[in-house]
Image (cartoon, rainbow, N blue to C red):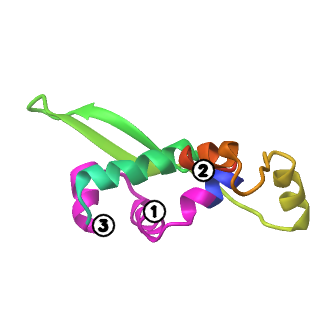
Amino acid sequence: MLKILEALANPHRLRIIALLTGRRIHVSQLAREVMISRPLLYMHLKRLEKAGLVTSKLELSEDGKAMNYYEVKPFALYLNPESITEAVKTLTLTKPGDPAADTNHEKGGNE
C-alpha cells in the first residue's frame, strides 16, 4: 500500500494514470499528452511500474521500430484504519538524523 500511495503522491503520475485509463499509449504520444520530456516521463513510469500500477510492452512496428506501450493494471486501494494498521507493520521506522533514515529516504523510503 505504501508504494502505491507514494507513486500516486505526484501530480504528473496521477495525470499519467488518468491518460492511460481505458487505453494503452505509445510512450512518445504519452509524453506529448502529459507535456513532459521522455526522460522525465520514463522516471515517472518506472515509479508507477514498480508500484504495480502500470505495465509496459515492447512491440515492433511494421517497419521494425521498437515501440514501447504502457497501460494501467487494474488496481483498487481501500483505505481504512485496519488497512493502515496492516501497512504500518511493514514500516521500518528510524529516528530523524539517523544515517539509516537518510539512506532509506534516498532509495524511495518507507519500504
Q: Main secondary structure of the magenta part?
A: helix
Q: Secondary structure at mark 1?
A: helix
In this view, the residue in front, 91 or 83, is 91
Query: Which residues are drawn in magenta?
Result: 6-35
Cα separation, mark 3 vs mark 1, equals 9 Å
Compare marks 2 and 3 and give the one earlier in the sequence: 3
Evaluate whether residue 81 shows in this view. Answer: yes
Compare marks 3 and 1 and give the one earlier in the sequence: 1
Q: Which residue is mark 2?
A: 105
Q: Which residue is mark 3?
A: 34
The x, y position of residue 22, in whole percent, is 45, 60
Q: Are marks 2 and 3 in contact (CB under 8 Å)?
A: no
Q: Which residue is mark 1?
A: 13
Q: Amino acid at mark 1?
A: Arg
Determine which quarter of the picture holds residue 85: bottom right
In this view, the residue in front, 45 or 54, is 45
Q: Is 31 one of the magenta-colored residues?
A: yes
The x, y position of residue 55, in whole percent, is 46, 43
Q: Amino acid at mark 3?
A: Val
